[in-house]
Image (cartoon, rainbow, N blue to C red):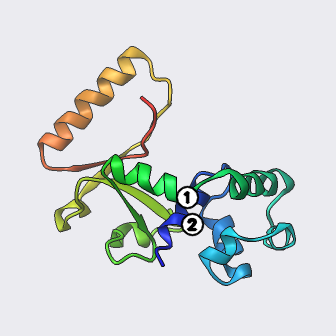
């Protein structure tokens, strides 16, 4: 079974990051069981009421197959920490992201990369400065990693 569906589901729930997800997986035994967890397991894993409510709602309303199809149609590959293609350097950081979205291909040369982190509502100057810096870095062969912000 492809577990990326469950990681994708969790990634769509506000407040569940790597540490909380790891506690829930440990409590439930697998990522699939964690996705299907009930309120008692969520509470035992240390999730607060707001996050429990968000997760319970996501379990009821998210169609994981539809979300997987949407990513595939957009040309996005989903890589989990369990996948062989997950970047080794990223896996070594404390609390690595359980799921990353890859548009294009990851290659050995991508170990030399820079992450772009910013605001969802940049100023005109900020947007232009980021565009120039990122363009120059990409032109020099540096892989640019983005969190997929809206702008």
Which numbered tag is attached to residue 110? Answer: none
Which residue: 24% across, 62% down? 106
Q: Secondary structure at mark 1?
A: helix
Residue 149 vertical placement versus 132 (above, below)? below
Residue 132 vertical placement versus 9 (above, below)? above
Q: Does label 1 or label 2 sit earlier along the sequence?
A: 2
Q: Nearer the viewer, residue 135 or 80?
A: 80
Q: Position of residue 18 (x, y in %)?
A: 59, 64
Quadrant position of residue 101: bottom left
Q: Secondary structure at mark 2?
A: helix
Distance CA(mark 1)–CA(mark 2): 7 Å
Which residue: 12% across, 40% down? 139
| Residue annotated with mark 1 | 64
Looking at this view, name the residue that lies furthest to the top. Answer: 124
Which residue: 81% across, 53% down? 53
Residue 83 vertical placement versus 50 (above, below)? below
Looking at this view, name the residue that lies furthest to the bottom. Answer: 29
Q: Position of residue 134 (x, y in %)?
A: 25, 36
Q: Position of residue 92 (x, y in %)?
A: 43, 73
Count residues near mark 1 (Cα–Cα under 10 Å), then give few for <14, some for 14-19, many for 20+: some
Residue contact at pointers 1 and 2, CB within 8 angstroms = yes
Residue 58 vertical placement versus 83 (above, below)? above
Count residues near mark 2 (Cα–Cα under 10 Å), then give few for <14, some for 14-19, many for 20+: many
Q: Nearer the viewer, residue 38 or 119?
A: 38
> Nearer the viewer's eye, disc 1 or disc 2?
1
Which residue: 59% across, 55% down? 63
Which numbered tag is attached to residue 6? Answer: 2
């Amino acid at each position: 079974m492809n577990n990326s569906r469950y990681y994708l589901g969790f990634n769509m729930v506000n407040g569940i990051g790597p540490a909380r997800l790891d506690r829930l997986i440990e409590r439930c035994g697998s990522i699939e069981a964690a996705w299907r967890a009930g309120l008692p397991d969520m509470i035992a894993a240390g999730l607060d009421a707001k996050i429990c409510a968000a997760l319970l709602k996501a379990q009821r309303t998210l169609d994981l197959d539809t979300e997987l199809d949407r990513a595939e149609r957009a040309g996005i590959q989903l890589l989990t920490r369990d996948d062989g293609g997950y970047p080794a350097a990223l896996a070594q950081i404390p609390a690595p992201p359980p799921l990353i979205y890859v548009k294009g291909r990851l290659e050995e040369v991508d170990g030399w990369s820079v992450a772009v982190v910013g605001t969802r509502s940049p100023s005109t100057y900020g947007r232009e400065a980021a565009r120039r810096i990122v363009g120059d870095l990409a032109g020099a062969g540096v892989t640019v990693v983005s969190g997929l912000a809206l702008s």
